[in-house]
Image: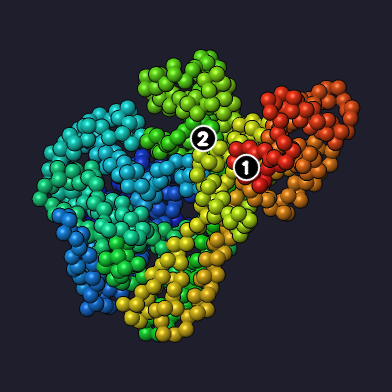
Amino acid sequence: MPLDFLNGTGAKKNVRTTLYGDQEFTQWELEILHTPVLQRLYNLKQLGFADRVFPDAVHSRINHVIGVAEVAERMATRLAVWLGRNETKSFAYALNQTNGAGWTISSISGAELAERVRRMIPVVRLMGLLHDLTHAAFGHTLEDEVCVFQEKHDDPARQIRFFDALVAQLLYLWTTELGIHAPDPDMFDALAHLEIPKEVTRWAEEVAATLGDKRHPLAKLLRELECAFSLLIQIEFLHSSGQDHSPDVPPLLVSAVVRTLDGELPPCDVVLHRDAFFVDIVGNTICADLLDYARRDPGNAALRVQFDDRLIRYVCAVSVKDGLSPTRQPCVRLALQFFTDKMRHDVLSEMSGILKARYLINERVLFHPTKCAAGAMLGTAVQLLGMASLPVWLQVLGDQEFIRMLVDLGERLAEELTTSHPAPSARAGAIGRAATRREELVQDCLSHILAEARSASDAVEIAKGRVTGARLLLWHLQSRRFHKLVFRLRPGVMHSGGANDETIANTYVDPARRFALEREVERTCHIPFGAVVIHCPKRKMSMKVAQALVVGADLTKVAHLRDVNSVSPESLEPYSDEIQAVERMYKSIWQFHAYLDPIHEAKRTLVAEVLRRCIGFPNDKLLSERLADGDVGNPYGLLAGDLNDSFAWNLLPDIIHQIDIGATIRMRHGEGESARERTTRVIRDITRQSMTGAQEQVPNDKQLTIPGVKPSDSEKV
């Protein structure tokens, strides 16, 4: 029966899951789950490339969001019980005046808040189901690790795009199921790619007219969905600090649809500073999101991580302000109470356990060097292909679809460059003429690549090299033949000039600078595009768990978990020390990694030496020693080692090129002279040529530098 979730039977469906057994879902929740925009989560792996290291870690985001809905409901239910026991407590919150008059302070009692929580449990469950809706393929890798795409999954603009698409998909499905319109595959395709057609308003009117009185319960259900959307949009804001006002919720399609269905229905009742704790339940510090993935991720990666669900029993609400509120105004937030009728040391130990669990996930899974290599290779492939941003229609692709699309894009770019030899100016005029989304992407990427070329004369050849490099990277990814580690910086490194690991992280987390460094190393070492990839995450690792709010017997004394000692008269220094120790462990996870295509393994020590000179920091000692093994008789190893001081550094590309030519000749005609003799001769010949051809000789006491190399690191002639 069409729209049978409106029949009012209240029947729920059991869904058997690994972590929670039978989970109950309402017909309305299943109606939302059974849409293209949510079903696509089946095709997004929760841990990206981690399954290349841990083969069983193939669970998808749909598994996760289903679990989060369950945990979020449990947390909300326990919170309602706690509020009921504290019904006389008063919770202050700020109201943001729309006329610019500033803030006014209001309050709500524990009893009123308990009743609100009970009414909002369906909304909380929807928030759990929808909190990862906006993730793209390899989203955390491309957006948060290698940062090649600036728009993040939780940017409000993307959230609104996906939320509106979900509502449009529901409306069109209802028009077909009610017999209003015959199903049109072209319309389904457009909606699946987040296109919102102008007919969407008419669809709402047609559904309202067809349903009659049943449009009113549908409007109420959609109002719950609107509340969930309105709260999820505020996640990033509630993670921030120092804001002078709360953001307005942009117009949502669902709001207009509800007005069409029932113009007399009260508006969505969301007051951000009063309702912030609902967002905390789903996705802030110790939240349903964390409690699910902290079990699911290590379990599927075969890591032994354990903590107890007892934490949920101690959730509470607190009114905070100043540094604990994003606007410094009173705000109701979720906290964990470690003192009830007695001191609950088990609560603190379980919180510490979750902190450790999250650390292990980061250390052993998310930042495993092999996974980082795969992520760096994908990021560099995307950059080489000229994808400066992620088009909307690509944001809905699954992981394998996205890789396949990149492969196809590489093939089309190669075809364009081979058959037409376009000049940048001619090609730029062709943008926008393509009839399909994919062809438009090809033209956009081609224009971007050609525009980045140094000059029109070599633009096509550079573009060909970039595309070939990207295609090889994608082939290696699909074959699991990853680049090998040749350079590593660990946290704590210092430079005599004052630079440190934070300097490196802040510099090369920028995708343009990292891309330029990769290409400079390749140019210097005479290796092709894509042979070198770099993984440099943000130096500041996420420590959201340590920012969880805790409270003792006095609800007015609230602090972050890391400062737990400040909210209790009892000495909690051991817990505080342990939490701060784990925080320091988090900082040790960061590493700067550079990887080399093993085809060019002979140049591994040379690549490492070039990187050392470019960034001004030495390679990890153990890795350097391992790379140097087997370098006897290797001319490139001699350039990086014994003969390092025998030539001007700016001549290195020419020296390597000449050695490459000599290596090819020797392969054809056999050995003649030793590697050291041959390398020394090449250095002498190239140096002589440079001195003869130079208009002005460089004095022996002057230093030569290459771009990105500090003068102190350059070599004397």
Q: What residue is rendered at 43% in x and 36% in y?
A: 389
In front: label 1 or label 2: 1
Query: Where is residue 597 drawn, in percent x and y?
Result: 66, 37
Cβ atoms under marks 1 and 2 closer than 8 Å: no
Which mark is drawn over residue 709? 1
Q: Is residue 182 above or below residue 63?
A: above
Q: How crowded is the residue under tag 2: few (<14 C-alpha within 10 Å), some, or many (20+)?
A: many
Q: Is mark 2 on a helix, strand or loop?
A: helix
Q: What residue is rendered at 26% in x and 63% in y?
A: 273
Q: How crowded is the residue under tag 1: few (<14 C-alpha within 10 Å), some, or many (20+)?
A: some
Q: Is residue 169 above or below residue 622?
A: above
Q: Nearer the viewer, residue 397 or 425?
A: 425
Q: Quadrant of residue 289?
A: bottom left
Q: Which amino acid does label 1 sit on?
A: Val
Would you name the residue on which mark 2 appears? 383
Horizontally, residue 400 falls left or right of residue 218, namely: right
Q: Is mark 1 on a helix, strand or loop?
A: loop
Real-space Cα separation, disc 1 to disc 2, in angstroms: 23 Å
Q: Nearer the viewer, residue 74 or 568?
A: 568
Work out which residue is located at the far top of the displayed protein and give it.
420
Q: Is residue 243 visible?
A: yes
